[in-house]
Image: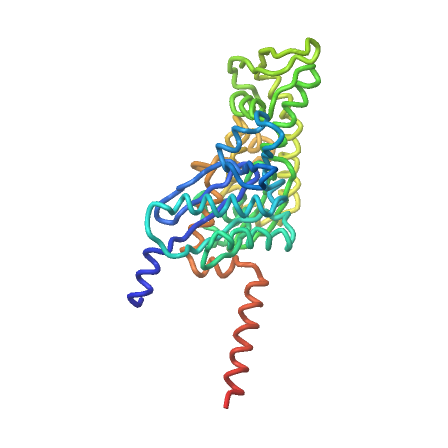
């Protein structure tokens, strides 16, 4: 490698980005996770200026006057507010790399399997606006598998279930390719809404942050672990006044049960359509759970029991997608296999034009 190439490799970091519905995680290859913030942006409606991003913006939800709008730029894993998404990515990448001099980074983002070509390109454009010298996107399920430590290039089939804020990706991977994929529009946000709806049915209203706290503290799948009730503050709709209310583990589990059942049914449906040799591989390689939803108490055990395939939770499941995206940059062969087909066609077309120009040059 030339001296300039060595300097570029040293100062130009490889960045993996999980631009998620609930959280955005920035991972630098060789340095680890350097930023993890909620995917939330707050801006002043009158001046149209951004006033907060990430955790600071999330804390404003439900607490600020009408002149401040708090938005989540992604819904169900895809961009719903391009400007806010672009701002979020640019500021988080700048924050992550601001402590040292650098050249523009190489950056890979993940996209869910349910995303359309237009939605994928929107992610790529938002990432490019962060000032990267190289950008592309890779399948979220494959990035999650790499981040979980799985060798995605081996021929033996492996299953990954990535449960994010907006979607659940169920994928069988073999030979760096996706053999089967199912995207379910259920994730952490769905469970939060279900908890709020169940409490509303009991004439009690709580905010999104309170519902999320109940999910994290008392949520479960299968058999209840036996945790003590929690007190949540909200509005008693009958009294028309603020109140505290005791919420039991069983109540939260019942609110989440339908969403968990849909995830389990989708996993079983994917398994039922797999070829026999792939199914045989999975009995040996098992199922790996990633994403924030992997931390739901008892979920891995419930999936294993209902599918007859052993299921485990990946180490640090919240950051698997970002870690995997960043590590893919370290493998040129794997990156080439995972990059979108359109990118390869573009490079082939450009090389063809260069060849034609050279052939006809005087």
- Closest to the observer: 308 or 77? 77
Task: Please name the residue shown 49% across and 36% down the image.
Answer: 54
Does 320 sit above or below residue 356?
above
Task: Please name the residue shown 57% across and 49% down the image.
Answer: 111
Does 350 sit above or below residue 139?
below
Q: Pinpoint residue 73: horizontal percent, then vertical percent.
A: 59, 41
**Side of 160 relative to 27 (left or right):** right
Q: Specify the farthest residue to the bottom.
A: 362
- Closest to the observer: 191 or 356? 356
Q: Specify the farthest residue to the top.
A: 239
Task: Please name the residue shown 43% across and 60% down the image.
Answer: 332
Colour approach in the figure: rainbow
> For residue 235, which quarter of the picture?
top right
Tell me if I can see residue 91 in this picture: yes
Q: Quadrant of the N terminus?
A: bottom left
Q: Pinpoint residue 20: horizontal percent, then vertical percent.
A: 54, 41
**Side of 266 relative to 32 (left or right):** right
Tell me if I can see residue 221 in this picture: no
- Closest to the observer: 62 or 347? 62
> For residue 162, which quarter of the picture?
top right
Q: Pinpoint residue 229: horizontal percent, then vertical percent.
A: 54, 13
> For residue 189, which quarter of the picture?
top right
Task: Please name the residue shown 64% across and 25% down the image.
Answer: 257
Q: Pinpoint residue 89: horizontal percent, then vertical percent.
A: 50, 46
Does 331 sit above or below residue 149?
below
Q: Specify the farthest residue to the front.
A: 47
- Count of picture labels: 0
């Amino acid at each position: 490698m030339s001296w300039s190439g060595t300097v570029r490799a040293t100062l130009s970091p490889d960045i993996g980005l999980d631009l998620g519905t609930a959280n955005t995680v920035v991972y630098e290859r060789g340095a680890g996770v350097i930023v993890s913030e909620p995917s939330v942006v707050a801006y002043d409606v009158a001046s149209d200026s951004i006033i907060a991003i990430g955790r600071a913006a999330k804390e404003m939800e439900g607490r600020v006057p009408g002149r401040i709008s708090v938005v989540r730029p992604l819904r169900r894993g895809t961009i719903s507010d391009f400007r806010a998404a672009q701002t979020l990515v640019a500021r988080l990448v700048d924050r992550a790399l601001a402590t040292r001099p650098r050249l523009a980074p190489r950056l890979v983002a993940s996209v869910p399997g349910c995303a359309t070509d237009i939605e994928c390109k929107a992610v790529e454009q938002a990432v490019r606006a962060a000032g990267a010298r190289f950008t592309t996107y890779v399948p979220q399920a494959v990035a999650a598998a790499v981040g979980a430590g799985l060798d995605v290039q081996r021929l033996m089939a492996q299953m990954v279930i990535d449960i994010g804020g907006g979607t659940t990706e169920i994928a069988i991977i073999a030979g760096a390719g996706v053999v089967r994929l199912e995207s379910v529009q259920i994730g952490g946000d769905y469970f939060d809404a279900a908890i709020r709806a169940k409490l509303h049915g009991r004439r009690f209203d709580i905010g999104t942050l309170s519902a999320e706290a109940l999910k994290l503290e008392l949520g479960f799948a299968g058999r209840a672990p036996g945790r003590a009730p929690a007190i949540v503050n909200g509005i008693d709709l009958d009294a028309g006044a603020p109140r505290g209310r005791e919420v039991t583990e069983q109540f939260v589990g019942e609110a989440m049960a339908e969403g968990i059942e849909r995830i389990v049914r989708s996993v079983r449906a994917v398994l039922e359509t797999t070829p026999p040799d792939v199914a045989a591989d999975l009995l040996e390689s098992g199922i790996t759970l990633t994403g924030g939803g992997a931390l739901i108490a008892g979920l891995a055990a419930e999936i294993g029991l209902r599918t007859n395939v052993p299921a485990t939770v990946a180490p640090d499941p919240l950051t698997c997608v970002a870690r995997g995206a960043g590590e893919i940059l370290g493998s040129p062969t794997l990156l080439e296999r995972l990059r979108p087909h359109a990118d390869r066609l573009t490079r082939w077309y450009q090389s063809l034009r260069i060849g034609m120009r050279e052939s006809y040059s005087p």
